């Protein structure tokens, strides 16, 4: 029987497996691939430099013993660090590093100088150690599945979330991307998944973080020269939840680092959960390679809740607060606040407060006043129709002309401005803006927004248009 890299490594694995904890074996040895055997040097491929450092730090003795058993006293180990090709079309980046001799039985055996210094793990966030990783998960236990009421508007996202919570990293919903408008429950659902996982698998490391905080931490790490520690920290997480990823738009450094962390986690069967206020196709200034990763798993939308769901959310809230309220009031609130669950709750909380403050019954009149305040605040959003009307008037054309297929420059510019303002002042998706402004597709709208941005930088007259029009919408 011929000796191959595979057979040697498999024998090593059998020995190693007998000598360490199953979880450690799974984490640090299963991902390794034997790639080459020449003479008595075995090359193994590891997924990252961090991985290599960890092996050297914690398992070099064990590796040494295992390998010596297989290949004799002159055994050598070479690490091949293979990272995904991320910069254009260059060759995948590989780096070969011979195993260090630290901790080895016989130091002379290692005749190749060690390239890297003793890897010391300096991690500001955690105390390293395979089983004692202590990371506060930052989860809010008040956001759980029990109080995340189900309705048509959230059924898909909610059940995908439950599936992920039952088998983190083990479903095809990886990443799970939850998207939807403001106040529709993205943050709540994201926490609920994390809370459920923590409950079912207390030993897993779960971390919830907003994309904004993630970005701040990253910038901080660059300043302090601890970028690697930052990456290492995130690569240790079993379930990473990043809220509001749209915040990463335009931040290429953070996107880049997130891309690497994402790949590492995904490759190692770890679960990633993301939320965003837009579907991936509508995200702007997010690199294509990241967007394509987002689409690997499942994108599930949280839609506006229907009337029944709004009623049950309100009833549930009242029930939990131990407050009774007449049906007609609850129905009135549910009928008038339709697109934001946070406002729905806000209105009912405000009603409860007012009634206990003034020690009087909640009347329909009071409900009307409270609701009006909320509805007025949300009604500030201008409509796409209104935007088209204002832009057309400004350029002294009619809306039909603005929407027409003509390529006349001043008309094209007016249309692009209308798209730009629709993007800026409404929550509509690119696709929906396009379909309302002359039946264009989302790419056209995206192009329009970019063109307007460019012209605003370079063309003084054009900047004046934008300023004038902005005033009309604010
Ligand atoms: P988003 O992150 O999408 O802006 P949040 O998760 O902050 O929205 O939700 C806003 C409020 O609405 C929170 O108080 C949340 O508990 C509540 N909420 C959202 N969806 C539901 C639901 N399905 N059942 C109960 N409460 C909900
Ligand atoms: Mg949120």
Image (tube, rainbow, N blue to C red):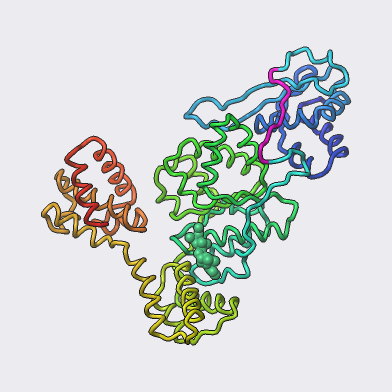
Foreground of the two, 112 or 133: 133
Q: How many marks?
A: 0
Foreground of the two, 450 or 363: 363
Residue 400 found in image quarter: bottom left
Foreground of the two, 76 or 141: 141
How far across and how far down the image is residue 279, in percent?
44, 54
Seen in the picture, residue 321 relative to 429 is either above or below; the reply is below
Seen in the picture, residue 62 relative to 408 is either above or below; the reply is above
Seen in the picture, residue 125 relative to 180 is either above or below; the reply is above
Span shown in magenta: 115-125
| Left or right for 368, reference 319 | left
Q: In which quarter of the image is the N terminus?
A: top right
The dominant secondary structure in magenta is: loop
Q: Seen from this angle, which residue lies furthest front?
A: 358
Confirm whether the magenta stretch covers residue 452. Answer: no
Residue found at x 48% / y 63%: 302
The answer to whether any part of residue 36 appears in the image is no
Confirm whether the magenta stretch covers residue 119. Answer: yes
How far across and how far down the image is residue 84, in percent?
57, 33
Residue found at x 80% / y 33%: 10
Q: Seen from this angle, which residue lies furthest left?
A: 396
| Left or right for 254, reference 101 | left
The answer to whether any part of residue 400 appears in the image is yes
Seen in the picture, residue 207 relative to 75 is either above or below; the reply is below
How far across and how far down the image is residue 9, in percent?
79, 30
| Left or right for 343, reference 9 | left
Foreground of the two, 141 or 407: 141
Residue 117 found in image quarter: top right
Q: In which quarter of the image is the C terminus?
A: bottom left
Residue found at x 48% / y 64%: 184
How far across and how far down the image is residue 227, in percent?
58, 32
């Amino acid at each position: 029987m011929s000796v191959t890299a595979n057979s040697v490594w498999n024998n090593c694995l059998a020995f190693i497996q007998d000598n360490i904890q199953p979880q450690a074996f799974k984490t640090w040895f299963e991902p390794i691939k034997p790639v080459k055997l020449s003479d008595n040097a075995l090359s193994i491929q590891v997924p990252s430099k961090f991985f290599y450092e960890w092996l050297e730090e914690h398992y070099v003795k064990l590796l040494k013993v295992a390998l010596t058993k297989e290949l004799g006293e002159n055994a050598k180990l070479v690490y091949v660090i293979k990272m995904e090709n991320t910069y254009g079309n260059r060759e995948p980046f590989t780096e070969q590093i011979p195993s260090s001799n630290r901790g080895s039985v016989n130091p002379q055996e290692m005749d190749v100088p060690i390239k890297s210094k003793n890897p010391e793990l300096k991690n500001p966030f955690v105390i390293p150690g395979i089983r004692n990783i202590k990371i506060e998960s930052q989860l809010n236990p008040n956001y759980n599945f029990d109080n995340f009421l189900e309705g048509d508007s959230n059924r898909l996202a909610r059940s995908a979330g439950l599936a992920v919570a039952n088998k983190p990293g083990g479903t095809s919903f990886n990443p799970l991307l939850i998207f939807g408008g403001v106040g529709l429950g993205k943050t709540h659902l994201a926490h609920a998944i994390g809370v459920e996982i923590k409950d079912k698998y207390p030993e897993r490391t779960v971390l919830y973080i907003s994309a904004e905080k993630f970005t701040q931490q990253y910038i901080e790490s660059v300043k302090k020269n601890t970028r690697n520690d930052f990456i290492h920290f995130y690569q240790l997480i079993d379930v990473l939840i990043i809220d509001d990823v749209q915040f990463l738009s335009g931040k290429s450094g953070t996107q880049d680092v997130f891309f690497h962390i994402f790949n590492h986690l995904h490759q190692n069967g770890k679960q990633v959960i993301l939320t965003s206020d837009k579907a991936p196709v509508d995200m702007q200034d997010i690199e294509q390679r990241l967007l394509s990763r987002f689409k690997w798993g499942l994108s599930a939308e949280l839609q506006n809740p229907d009337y029944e769901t709004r009623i049950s959310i309100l009833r549930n809230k009242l029930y939990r607060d131990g407050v009774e309220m007449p049906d007609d009031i609850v129905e009135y609130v549910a009928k008038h606040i339709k697109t934001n669950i946070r406002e729905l709750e806000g209105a009912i909380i405000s009603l409860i407060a007012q009634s206990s403050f003034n020690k009087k019954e909640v009347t329909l009149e009071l409900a009307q006043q409270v609701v009006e305040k909320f509805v007025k605040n949300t009604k500030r959003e201008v409509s796409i129709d209104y935007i088209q009307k204002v832009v057309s008037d400004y350029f002294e054309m009619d809306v039909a002309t603005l929407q027409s297929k003509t390529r006349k420059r001043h008309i094209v510019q007016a249309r692009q401005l209308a798209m730009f303002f629709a993007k800026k002042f409404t929550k509509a998706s690119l696709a929906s803006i396009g379909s309302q402004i002359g039946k264009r597709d989302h790419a056209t709208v995206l192009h329009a927004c970019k063109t307007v941005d460019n012209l605003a930088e370079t063309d003084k007259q054009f900047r004046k248009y934008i300023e004038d029009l902005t005033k009309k919408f604010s």
